[in-house]
């Protein structure tokens, strides 16, 4: 098996063991998410009204649909912005295979409440439910990396964003994409937290598809219609020769019961990076339980705060 389908992120268990693209333009779209679009979390209605929060250290925030255009593509996402004047650090969240921005609703709300501009995107063609442009048959790891690079440069240009403190954060395939983008962006990325990054995708797919000439032009995989180009693209990606080009701090959070991405990939990544920490989540799989997800979310906030505040 190579990568997971729709990622589950949820809410705390016992403490785990520590072990430049073209310039983009954005439009704000206050339209509702179609009711037929299924998600793991209830969809939020876009609003420009402050979200009500509690606690002396908790900030109110504004959430809105936010589309970024670059080249001939448009990337749909949701932007969560703390209310108040000034500049804030930002975190860009990348979903896994066949996921959408809604996989990170809890994380985006949580980080906005704690003083981060949070943007979760739909990769172009990255899901049958994506609201970005493009077909799933044209999606590749490289196309998703290009989407993320464009989003990064746009978020970096926002007036209320501290351009020196931008975090890339992804889960599963989105974790791999975030790592590949960070390797290219270098010290522009403040830090790199990852949930169970699917560093096994290229090697697994190459092993399972050794003869490109025999591959069909399109095929179905885990509920998503894909194109031959996805497989062809993998032959040009050497994960562990690439990701170590990022010299900043990396946090990998991985479940001990993950049957989709073996723990050995997380450990090899930690050995590859100059500055990386692995937190293992006992009993958690590929997609955290509600309690595990809450714990992981808190670890990521602590990690980001060390580098952005």
Image (cartoon, rainbow, N blue to C red):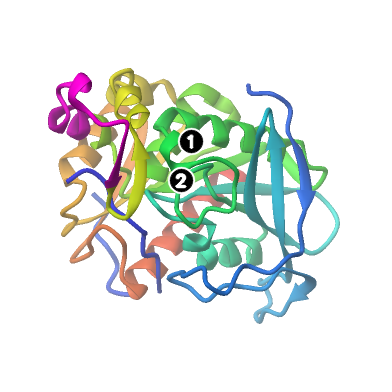
Q: Secondary structure at mark 1?
A: helix
Q: Position of residue 247 (x, y in %)?
A: 44, 25
In the image, 174 versus 274, the foreground residue is 174
The residue pinned by badge 2 equals: 126
Q: Secondary structure at mark 2?
A: loop
Against 162, is 98 above or below?
below
Mark 2 surroundings within 10 Å by alpha-carbon count, few (fewer than 14), some (14 through 19), many (20 or more): many
- The Cα–Cα distance between marks 2 and 1, rounded to whole angstroms, is 8 Å
Against 279, is 61 above or below?
below
Quarter of the image for residue 287 reads: bottom left
Q: Earlier in the sequence, mark 2 or mark 1?
A: 2
In the image, 116 versus 126, the foreground residue is 126
The residue pinned by badge 1 equals: 144
Quarter of the image for residue 274 reads: top left
Viewer-nearest of labels 2 and 1? 2
Against 98, is 135 above or below?
above
Q: Is residue 180 visible?
A: yes
Residue 52's disc is none
- Residue at 80%, 48% (x, y): give it: 160
- Residue at 60%, 67% (x, y): give it: 109
For residue 200, side relative to residue 114 (left or right): left
Q: Is residue 117 visible?
A: no
Indicate whether residue 142 is drawn in magenta: no
- Residue at 68%, 69% (x, y): give it: 32
Q: Position of residue 217 (x, y in %)?
A: 32, 31
For residue 91, side relative to residue 258 (left or right): right
For residue 177, side relative to residue 232 (left or right): right
Q: Position of residue 140 (x, y in %)?
A: 41, 32
Mark 1 surroundings within 10 Å by alpha-carbon count, few (fewer than 14), some (14 through 19), many (20 or more): many
Residue contact at pointers 2 and 1, CB within 8 angstroms: yes
Specify the segment rendered in magenta: 203-220
Q: Position of residue 11 (x, y in %)?
A: 40, 74
């Amino acid at each position: 098996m190579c990568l997971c389908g729709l990622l589950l992120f949820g809410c705390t268990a016992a403490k785990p063991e520590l072990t430049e693209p073209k310039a983009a333009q954005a439009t704000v779209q206050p339209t509702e998410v179609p009711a037929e679009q299924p998600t793991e979390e209830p969809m939020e209605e876009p609003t420009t009204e402050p979200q009500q929060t509690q606690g002396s250290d908790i900030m109110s925030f504004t959430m809105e649909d936010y589309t970024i255009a670059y080249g001939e593509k448009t990337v749909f996402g949701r932007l969560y912005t703390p209310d108040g004047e000034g500049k804030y650090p930002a975190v860009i969240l990348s979903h896994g295979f066949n996921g959408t921005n809604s996989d990170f609703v809890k994380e985006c709300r949580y980080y906005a409440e704690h003083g981060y501009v949070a943007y979760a995107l739909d990769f172009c063609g990255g899901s049958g439910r994506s609201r970005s442009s493009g077909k799933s048959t044209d999606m590749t790891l490289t196309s998703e990396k290009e989407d993320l690079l464009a989003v990064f440069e746009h978020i970096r240009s926002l007036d209320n964003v501290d351009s020196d403190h931008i975090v890339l954060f992804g889960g599963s395939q989105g974790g791999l994409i975030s790592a590949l983008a960070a390797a290219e962006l270098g010290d522009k990325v403040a830090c790199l937290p990852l949930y169970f990054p699917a560093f096994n995708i290229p090697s697994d797919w190459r092993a399972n598809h050794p003869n490109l000439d025999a591959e069909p032009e399109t095929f179905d995989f885990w509920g998503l219609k894909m194109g031959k180009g996805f497989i062809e693209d993998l032959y040009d990606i050497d994960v562990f020769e690439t990701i170590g080009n990022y010299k900043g701090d990396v946090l990998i959070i991985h479940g001990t019961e993950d049957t989709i991405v073996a723990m050995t990939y997380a450990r090899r990544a930690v050995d590859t990076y100059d500055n990386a920490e692995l937190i293992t989540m006992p009993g958690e799989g590929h997609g955290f339980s509600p309690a595990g997800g809450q714990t992981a979310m808190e670890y990521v906030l602590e990690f980001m705060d060390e580098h952005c505040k």
